[in-house]
Amino acid sequence: MATGVLPQATVGDVLAELALLEDPRIRAVNERHGDDHGVNLTKLRAVAKSLKTDHELAARLWQTGDTAARLVAILISRPKQYSATELDTMLRDARVPKVHDWLVGYVVKKNPHVEELRVAWFSDPDPVVASAGWALTSDRVAKSPDGLDLTGLLDLVEARMKDAPDRLQWAMNECLATIGIHHPEHRARALEIGERLEVLKDYPTPPGCTSPFAPIWITEIVRRQQG
């Protein structure tokens, strides 16, 4: 999709372009998930692509507080240039789920301070911040588990997931499933914890998608991996 944004765009240019792309129907759908913007994400990505990488503009877009502008900011920033303090401040300010998820997935995971932040956020008293720590831990469980106490993680899930706030509960459940999928020696316990706690057991799942209920999730992905 062609956009009217030029590579040398100002914050005002980008906000104006995003305003033109605002769709009330998309906003209504997004707001049901806590995301306060109405821009189709494919079109939003096209705006970011037209801007190319521009870390300084990204910082100014972030400062607007506008959700769509922050999503563009994430896409045009240089993840490795952020300090740990900057990312900590940004995450604590990122209360919109999509902004939070993109910040963790597209920026923090590519930043040299990722492990320092994972450890700091994991036990944070703010459950939304803690959910980022758990999401980063799930990534390590899958990709670089050496040094992680997987038994200890399962202990925490078993003790806390049932009563955790929604965002944190979701992240803990993902960690539970990731352990069960990637570590056969812990699979039986992961399945048992999931069955007993029944977290997300009744979550509405569209046809063709895998349920986030950990026992179903683990069993399905392992089946696919084993062919």
Image (cartoon, helix red, strand yellow):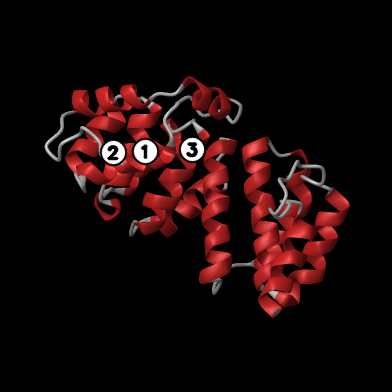
Q: Amino acid at mark 3?
A: Lys
Label 3 residue SS? helix
Q: Nearer the viewer, mark 1 or mark 3?
A: 1
Give the position of the N terminus as an image quadrant.
Answer: top left
Classify mark 1: helix, strand or loop.
helix
The residue carrying mark 1 is 43
In which quadrant of the rendered view does residue 146 lie? bottom right
According to the picture, the residue beneath numbered tag 2 turns out to be: 47
The answer to whether the residue labelled 2 contacts the one labelled 1, judged by CB atoms less than 8 Å apart, is yes
Q: Nearer the viewer, residue 78 or 168?
A: 78
Q: Are marks 2 and 3 in contact (CB under 8 Å)?
A: no
Any part of residue 121 in sight: yes
In this rendering, the answer to whether 126 lies above or below 13 is below
Q: Is residue 86 visible?
A: no
Measure the alpha-carbon separation of dots 2 and 3: 17 Å
Q: Up-down: is 223 above or below 60?
A: below
Give the crowd class for mark 3: few <14, some 14-19, many >=20 residues within 10 Å. many
How far apart in space, not on screen, are marks 2 and 1 (Cα)?
A: 6 Å
Task: Give, as a three-letter code, the residue at label 2.
Answer: Val
Count of numbered circles in the view = 3
Helix, strand or loop for disc 2? helix
Q: Residue furthest right?
A: 196
Q: Quadrant of residue 3?
A: top left
The answer for how far apart the CA atoms under marks 1 and 3 are is 16 Å
**Which mark, residue 34?**
none
Marks 1 & 3, CB-CB < 8 Å contact: no
